[in-house]
Amino acid sequence: MAVEVGSKAPDFTLNDYNRQPVTLSEHTAAKNVLLVFYPFAFSGICQGELCQVRDELATYENGNVQVIGVSVDTPFSLKAWAEQQGYQFPLLSDFWPHGDVAKQYGVFNEAAGLANRGTFLIDTTGTVRYAEINAPGEPRDQEAWKKAIAEL
């Protein structure tokens, strides 16, 4: 079952693409967090979505929001992708145990072994303020995220 608006966001620690641990609650202590689950690095829709985030990162940062991407990819592939695309926000590896955090958020697709497109806005108290889940081939409407951020 997916994490719902108004619930406490499950805390976690995952390695980023530099294999450094990143803990959600450490970020939410200082900023709101836009947690963006995506199926795979180097895939078309995922790249388009994260490139849009990259290009509009100042909008999120001005809204006191830290963007964090999560996929089941290895840190090594995430690092190559981040360097190739110039992503300046953390990309976290939910590789092992495979999809464990995606499962906690209710976005893990067991049949395909990937995270569905889940988006969660978590405020500084750790409460989920926005939640959306899209199927792997279904792109997200990022304007809905921006509206949720504006309402914080």
Image: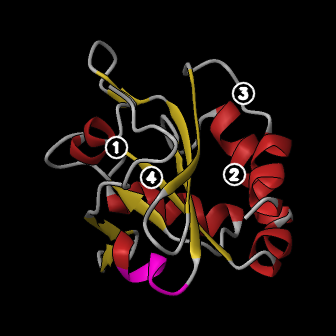
Residue identified by numbered label 3:
139
Amino acid at pointer 2: Leu
* First reached walking from the N terminus: tag 3 or tag 2: 2
- Between 4 and 140, the one lying in front of the other is 4
In the displayed structure, would residue 105 be above or below residue 54?
above
Residue 41 magenta: no
Q: In the picture provided, is 94 more to the left or to the right than 34?
A: left
Amino acid at pointer 4: Val
CB-based contact (under 8 Å), mark 3 and mark 2: no
Residue identified by numbered label 2:
50
Q: CA distance from mark 2 to mark 4?
A: 11 Å
Q: In the picture provided, is 62 more to the left or to the right than 42?
A: right
* First reached walking from the N terminus: tag 4 or tag 3: 4
The residue lying at 72 percent from left, 27 percent from top is: 139
* First reached walking from the N terminus: tag 3 or tag 1: 1
Q: CA distance from mark 4 to mark 3?
A: 16 Å
Q: Secondary structure at mark 2?
A: helix
Q: CA distance from mark 2 to mark 1?
A: 15 Å
In the displayed structure, would residue 99 be above or below residue 30?
above
In the rendered image, the quadrant that contains the N terminus is top left
Q: Which residues are magenta?
A: 26-30
Q: Secondary structure at mark 4?
A: strand
